[in-house]
Image: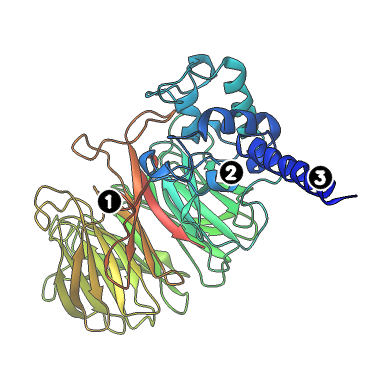
Amino acid sequence: MDNFQKKSALLVLLSIVILSSCKRDRGTPEFGNFPAPVAKIMMGKCAVPGCHTGQSKDANGGLSLVSWNDLFNGSTNGADVIPYRTDFSPLLFFVNTYPDLGISLKPTMPNNRPALSRDEVETLKNWITQGAPDENGFVKFSDNPNRRKIYVSNQGCDVVTVFDEVTGIPMRYISVGISPNIEAPHMIKISPDGKYWYVVFTSSNVVQRYNTSDDSFAGQVSINSGNWNTITFTHDSKYAFVVDWSANGQIAYLDLSSMSVISTWTGSQLFEYPHGSAINKTDDTLYVTGQTGNYIYKIPINDPTSAEQVSLQPGKPAVTSPSLDIHEISFSPDYSKYFVTCQGTNEVRVIKTSNDSLLKIIPVGIWPQEMSFSKTSNYMFVSCQEDTLTFPGKRGSIAVIDYNSNTLFKTVFSGFQPHGLTVDDTKNLVYVANRNVTSKGPAPHHTGYCGGRNGYVTFIDMTTMTLVTDLYNDKRTELSVDPYSVAIR
């Protein structure tokens, strides 16, 4: 072969490579690790110049659709596709113009282009129903049973949102409850052994549990009807106590090995509006707040009828009145003291465990609710749901308290009506569920199939004690209606 022939062959080879590369860049079905039918839609109508590409995503909600992996990085509002859940996948809402196929929202995508055909919408819907797998059939987040996760109960929609801790975006939505009516999953909590998450409802007579490995249903136990608010475990994860917030309240004592009721502690005015609960270090005494009074109950596990009312106002008897309205109770990591949130007086009280003496009163924002402790620093975080004074024009705050010195360190605005929260010491973050249930809160990005106003999660950076931000503003992940309780695995 002479030099001219060699050069000609080389040019032909280069042309083939270039044409092949261009063809792939233009969106062949296999591009981006999407299954072929989905890739045709994504690459032909979504990941096009000016829309959801790597170069233009920042002007389009931060969502890139150039690959399957990019899709699961989410957008500025969180996850756009939830495997198996078309009812919680916003990408589908905005491309669907056929109401009989599900939620249909404006503005219709693709923007300023012809809407997707019915066949195309059905292709995407069927793909999500099957788990939104990649071209090899792999479903995102299905590969690691030991994955660290954040769980948020959505009280207005009977679902639990499961966050992947590494990426910080929702990976699953799990339906909970036993009725088609809203049962209001009030508290979600992980057992100390990390094997299960449990959920209690204010409008149901069951306690349900799910495997943390794959979030599959793992059983339930029927209890009396009641306004069930909180659940607490013994340290060996064998037993639990569930509290009914009622005028003539009750406490269900559960055997978690058999998922059965050992006994129900109830009686005429034995417990009046009990709410928050915690167990002592030796698992022999249950501490429960009396939310309409100035006291807590100390309940011997082996003799609940001898429960003691302990006033947390020195020199005053235990009385049923709206003096303190003690909402929640938590022990310090070393159990030397316990903290209570007093929503009637907008303060946190610090009590010495050994003799129930008052150590400190810490003023905080309006309507203090939940608490979470860092174990790698000296800080605890308290959600003050209705605080309108600390940050004028806003509603809600997070009080950061140094639990060694019992002093208020800082106050952070996390979002509208914060309630549940949990500390992630691994990532140095605090996850805060902002309920956003009144019309004065920020308008949700979209509505879901439950209707109502979606709430959202924000993230506090514990190194700076400020909110994590994205390209636009404070980073927030929109969830479903009334995100209420948060737990971390």
Foreground mark, 1 or 3, reads 3
- Where disc 2 sits, the SS reads loop
Question: Residue 473 — which label?
Answer: 1
Residue toward you, 25 or 468:
25
Q: CA distance from mark 1 to mark 2?
A: 26 Å
The earlier-in-sequence mark between 1 and 2 is 2
Q: Which residue is mark 3?
A: 9
The earlier-in-sequence mark between 1 and 3 is 3
Asked whether the viewer can see residue 270, the reply is: no
| In the rendered image, the vertical position of residue 17 relative to residue 291, given as above or below | above
Residue 428 shown left or right of residue 417 in the figure: right
Q: Are marks 3 and 2 in contact (CB under 8 Å)?
A: no
Foreground mark, 3 or 2, reads 3
Q: Position of residue 36 (x, y in %)?
A: 70, 33
Residue toward you, 148 or 208:
148
Residue toward you, 74 or 139:
74
| In the rendered image, the vertical position of residue 1 relative to residue 324, given as above or below | above
Type of amino acid at the residue the image marks with label 2: Ser
- Where disc 1 sits, the SS reads loop
Type of amino acid at the residue the image marks with label 3: Ala
Type of amino acid at the residue the image marks with label 1: Asn
Q: Position of residue 65 (x, y in %)?
A: 53, 40
- Where disc 3 sits, the SS reads helix
| In the rendered image, the vertical position of residue 303 relative to residue 162, given as above or below | below
Q: CA distance from mark 3 to mark 2?
A: 34 Å
| In the rendered image, the vertical position of residue 357 relative to residue 278, given as above or below | below
Question: Residue 67 — which label?
Answer: 2
